[in-house]
Amino acid sequence: MKPSGRAPQHHPCCSRPHTAAVDDYLKAIFDLCAGGGSATTTSIAALVGVAAPSVSAMLARLADDDLITRPGPHRVELTDHGRRHALAVVRRLRIVEEFLVRALDVPWHEVRPEAEQLSRAVSERLLERIDAHLGHPTHDPHGDPIPPAHGEHDEARPQALSRARPGTHVIVSRVSDRDCELLLYLGQLGIRPGVVLDVLEQAPFGGPLWVAIDGRRVPLGPQLTDHVFGGTT
């Protein structure tokens, strides 16, 4: 996530303007904490793509602006104030992702980096027009829920495919969009939100999970099954 040259956005509730870098950090912390996860200096550095000393400096700034709190020596959490801003950033990104896939046929494994660049330049007025044009979508192309402009938002992820038991059926609802190559491969297999997977067997000793997709037997290793989410039937 490389910051752009976007002009800082001023918010009446903040003492300082928000830059693209601030938005990237808020989004990274939000992503890491989603579904009961945790954010640390190391994990934030890896996700944002910067060195740990740079992360420490930015976290100090975010804490001064009441955007984050430090419940432990290495843990980071969003304050209510920070979560409001993070949700606005996530909403913008996911609406733009949905627009690029639907309107311009951008492949789902390529859309995240394109949307990150474009979403920084889209005004709030244009964003709401895009949202209305799309019919106010509730999810992006990877199944991630789009935060509403107003009201509550639930970011909790369903169970990972890696926890599904043989003999069950999994309706895929979300797929992690952090790895473009992973998305490309899953797309080639036909694994997308809305697809039903028949869980056949789990190979022993850390072996693959065998599933059926439209009658095809496919082995999926843990690097894949930990990034596919859905409900079982």
Image (cartoon, grey):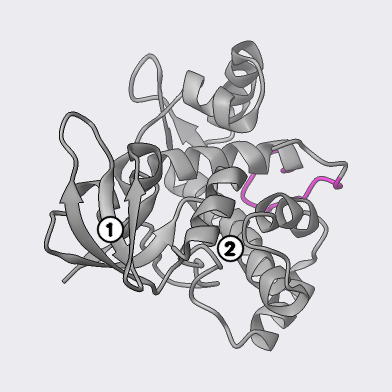
The quadrant the C terminus occupies is bottom left
Q: In this view, does 56 lie to the left or right of 218?
A: right
Which label belongs to residue 211? 1
The answer to which of 144 and 21 lies nearer the viewer is: 144
- Mark 2 Cα within 10 Å, few/some/many (few <14, many 20+)? many
- Mark 1 Cα within 10 Å, few/some/many (few <14, many 20+)? many
What is the C-alpha distance between the residues marked 1 and 2?
Answer: 33 Å
* x and y, in percent, of residue 123 in the image: 79, 66
Q: Give the range drawn in magenta.
A: 6-19
* Residue named by callout 2: 91
The disc labelled 2 sits on which kind of residue?
Arg
Determine whether the residue tagged by mark 2 lies in a helix, strand or loop.
helix
Would residue 18 be counted in the magenta stretch?
yes
State the image quarter where residue 60 is shown: top right
Q: Is residue 191 left or right of residue 119?
A: left
Q: In this view, does 160 lie above or below 102?
A: above
